[in-house]
Image (cartoon, helix red, strand yellow):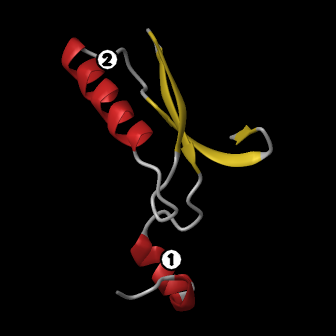
Amino acid sequence: GNYRGQLIAVKTSKKKLSNKAIDQFNQEIQVYSSIRNEYIIQYIGSCNVPEHTMMLMEYAPYESVKKAYKKEPKCVRKP
């Protein structure tokens, strides 16, 4: 997707969530929204309307650190 000119990832649920799944979703939102670090994918927003549960996150072009390192080893710093 695209949000204010920024490429984003949209995490969606394909089915109605149970109460337990909604609680887990809300916990995930709390964790992501409290983290601000240039090395961690940024949380942008979410929607928790029945049948339309989604989370908007900064897009990660390589999906994982492992894939990023395989594609461009110079972009991943070693500690």
Query: Which residue is drawn at the image coordinates 25% and 21% (left, top)?
Result: 23
* Residue drawn at (25%, 14%) of the image: 18
The quarter of the displayed image where residue 44 is located: top right
How far apart marks 2 and 1 lie (CA) works out to 32 Å
Q: Nearer the viewer, residue 14 or 42?
A: 42
Q: In this view, does 8 lie to the left or right of 40?
A: right
For the C terminus, the quadrant is bottom left
x then y, percent, for residue 14: 43, 25
Q: Residues within 10 Å of mark 2 (few under 14, many from 20)?
A: some
Q: Which amino acid does label 2 sit on?
A: Leu
Contact between labelled residues 1 and 2, with CB atoms less than 8 Å apart: no
Using the image, tell me which numbered label, if any, was put on residue 68.
Answer: 1
Q: Looking at the image, which residue sits at the far left?
A: 20
Q: Residue 17 carries which label?
A: 2
Q: In this view, does 47 lie above or below 62?
A: above
Q: Residue at x 55, y 91 (%)?
A: 74
x then y, percent, for residue 59: 59, 53
**Where is residue 25, by image quadrant?**
top left
Q: Position of residue 26 (x, y in %)?
A: 33, 24
